[in-house]
Amino acid sequence: MTLDTLNLIFKSIIYFDEYLRILSLSDTDFKLITDGQLPLRQCLHREACVKEIELPAYYNKFSDLRKEFNHFKSGDLSRALVPVKDIKKILQLPATQLPQSIAEMVKELNITAGDDSEFYMKECRDMILIIQHLLKADIWE
């Protein structure tokens, strides 16, 4: 990683932290939501540790959208209300697979995807649509 890249990461962390202060948000007022755990847990945290950059506390608390979606999908009553005599059958049911992409989640929820031509902007907008859908379904506190 070059010094310019390191400076960009450090500046981005500082700018985001300043932005939160402008909004008067404390680290308990929000939670980061990621597409998988890799971006934060295995990339940002690792690089920050290696480069001795101290991350604000809110980077330690995040939700993985794929896991939350999976939780939403498997939250139907088919697994919730089971007679005790059938509990072994539930344990033998295959675990649901995590979605492989944002597009897969959008399709499964039957949401109209964003039409942005820039890939990352489209992914962000589609994530927002998914999050809004999950919030309406009341799966997050």
Image (cartoon, rainbow, N blue to C red):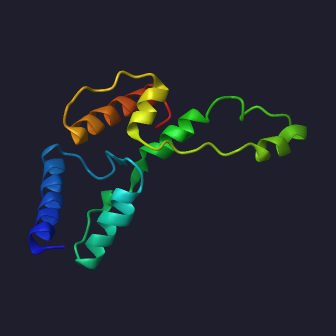
In percent of the image, x 15 and y 66: which residue is there? 10
**Foreground residue among 50 and 29:** 50
Q: Is residue 138 left or right of residue 111?
A: right
User: Residue 89, how many percent across, how many down?
Assistant: 83, 41
When asked about the image quadrant of residue 39, the answer is bottom left
Q: Quadrant of the N terminus?
A: bottom left
When asked about the image quadrant of residue 114, the answer is top left
In percent of the image, x 56 and y 40: which residue is there? 71
Name above or below for residue 49 compared with residue 37.
Answer: below
In percent of the image, x 44 and y 27: which residue is there? 107
Name above or below for residue 111 compared with residue 102.
Answer: above
Q: Visible in this render: residue 122?
A: yes
User: Residue 95, how many percent across, how many down?
Assistant: 66, 46
When asked about the image quadrant of residue 126, the answer is top left
**Foreground residue among 21 and 137:** 137
In percent of the image, x 45 and y 22: which residue is there? 110
**Foreground residue among 2 and 129:** 2
Count the marks: how many?
0
Name above or below for residue 3 compared with residue 94.
Answer: below
Q: Is residue 88 left or right of residue 19?
A: right
**Foreground residue among 112 and 75:** 112
User: Residue 49, how many percent across, how many down?
Assistant: 29, 75
User: Residue 23, how many percent across, how many down?
Assistant: 16, 43
Q: Visible in this render: residue 137?
A: no
